[in-house]
Amino acid sequence: MSVDVYSEKASCERLLSVHRWTDKLLTFRTTRPAGYRFTAGQFARLGLEVDGEIVSRAYSITSAESGEELEYYAIIVPGGKFTTRLDAMQPGDPVWVEKLSYGFMTADRFTDGSQLWMLATGTGLGPYLSILQQKDVWEKFQDLVVVHCVRNREELAYADKFDALRAQAQANGLPARLHYLQSVTRESGDDAVLSGRITTLLRDGGLERATGLAIDAAHSRFMACGNPEMVTEVREILRERGMTPLRRTGGGQFVTEDYW
Ligand SMILES: Cc1cc2nc3c(=O)[nH]c(=O)nc-3n(C[C@H](O)[C@H](O)[C@H](O)COP(=O)(O)OP(=O)(O)OC[C@H]3O[C@@H](n4cnc5c(N)ncnc54)[C@H](O)[C@@H]3O)c2cc1C
Ligand SMILES: NC(=O)c1ccc[n+]([C@@H]2O[C@H](COP(=O)([O-])OP(=O)(O)OC[C@H]3O[C@@H](n4cnc5c(N)ncnc54)[C@H](OP(=O)(O)O)[C@@H]3O)[C@@H](O)[C@H]2O)c1
C-alpha cells in the first residue's frame, strides 16, 4: 500500500526505544497517537515503510490502557518483510500506527468464573502483560494464571515483570493470586521451570499440579495466544472438557488469538 493511502487510516508515530532480550526477541515502544484508545488484550496494526510501500502487521499491545506510550513484544522472523525492517530501526525512526485498535481477546468479556488461565507460546505473552496492568482483572478473578511456553530458557522474557505486578497488586490490596508458570520444550526443566508443551501440560494435569488449581467449566476461563497449532489443540482439549468459545450473547469459557 502506498504511504498516501495508508496515511488516511494511520498516524505517523516515532520509535522511542528498543530493548533486546535475545538476538531475535525485542520489546519496542512507540509514541501513542493522539486520542488512541484500546482495551487491554487488543492489538495495534503497525506500518513500516519498505521500498516506498507500507508493510503493515498486527502487534499486541503490552502496555497499560492508560500508558503514555505504546509497547510491543516482538520476534524477528528470518526473512520476514516487516521484522527485517524493524530489526534495523533506531529510536526516532517513523512507525505508522493505525488509528483503530483490534481484537476480541479481552478479559472484560468474561462475565463469570474464578480462575483466568492465560496460555502463551513465544511472543503470545504480550496481551497478558497489558491485561495484568488493569486493576479490574485482579478484582474479577481469584486466581490469575500465566503460562509461558518457549523453546529455550533465554526466551523467557518479562519474568521479573510478573513479580513486580504481583507486588504492586498486593500493595494495592487487590485480592487475586497470580501464578506465573514457565515451560521450555527444547531443553530440560527443573524445580522452577516446567518442561513440555502447554498442550501436554494441560492434558496430563501438569498445569493443575503446578498451581494447585482444578480446571473445570464452572470456574476456569481461558485465553490462548501465539502459535496457531497450539491454539487449535488447546481449543480441542477445552472442548473435550465441556468448554466452548466465549459468545457475544453470553456463555462460553475461552477466547483465543492466532499470531499467524
Ligand atoms: C492478531 C495478531 C497479533 C500479533 N501480535 C504479535 C506480537 O505481539 N508480536 C509478534 O512478534 N508478532 C505478532 N504477530 C505476528 C506479526 O503480525 C507478524 O506476522 C510478524 O511480525 C512477522 O511479520 P514479517 O513480515 O516479518 O514476517 P512474515 O513474512 O509475515 O512471516 C510470517 C511467518 O513468521 C512466523 N511468525 C510470525 N509471527 C510470529 C511470532 N510472533 N512468533 C513466532 N513465529 C512467528 C510464522 O511462521 C509465519 O508464517 C501478530 C499477528 C496477529 C495476527
Ligand atoms: N521455518 C519454519 O518452518 C519455522 C517454523 C516455526 C517457526 N519458525 C521461526 O522460528 C522462530 C521461532 O518462534 P518461536 O519459537 O517463538 O515460536 P514457536 O515455534 O511457535 O515455538 C514457541 C513454543 O510453542 C511450542 N509449540 C509449537 N507448536 C506447538 C503446538 N502445536 N502445540 C503446543 N505447543 C507448540 C514450541 O514447542 P516445540 O519446541 O515443541 O516446537 C515452543 O515451546 C520464529 O522466527 C519463526 O518464524 C520457523
Image (cartoon, helix red, strand yellow):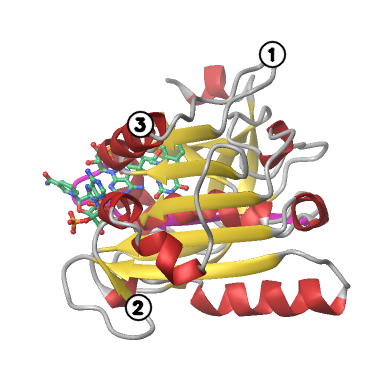
Locate the N terminus by quadrant.
Answer: top left
Name the residue nearer the viewer: 21 or 85: 21
Which x, y percent locates residue 5? 54, 17
Left/right of residue 126 with respect to residue 66 in the rendered view: left
For discs 2 and 3, the disc positioned in front in the rendered view: 3
| Residue 249 circle label | 1
Instruction: First in sequence, mark 1 or 2: give its number.
Output: 2
Left/right of residue 190 with respect to residue 62 in the rendered view: left
Disc 3 packing (10 Å; few <14; some 14–19; many ≥20): few
Label 1 sits on a secondary structure element that is loop
Distance (Cα) linking label 1 and label 2: 39 Å
Left/right of residue 181 with respect to residue 94 in the rendered view: left
| Residue 193 circle label | 2
Q: Is residue 206 above or below residue 171?
A: above
Which x, y percent locates residue 186? 16, 68
Look at 68% across and 29% down and name the residue there. 99
Looking at numbered disc 1 in the image, what kind of residue is underneath it?
Thr
For discs 1 and 3, the disc positioned in front in the rendered view: 3
Residue 68 is covered by the magenta coloring: yes
Looking at numbered disc 3 in the image, what kind of residue is underneath it?
Glu
Which x, y percent locates residue 79? 19, 46
Disc 1 packing (10 Å; few <14; some 14–19; many ≥20): few
Name the residue nearer the viewer: 151 or 69: 151
Query: Which residue is denoted by mark 3 in the rendering?
Result: 240
Label 2 sits on a secondary structure element that is loop
Instruction: First in sequence, mark 2 or 3: give its number.
Output: 2
Label 3 sits on a secondary structure element that is helix
The residues colored magenta run 67-80
Which x, y percent locates residue 222? 53, 42
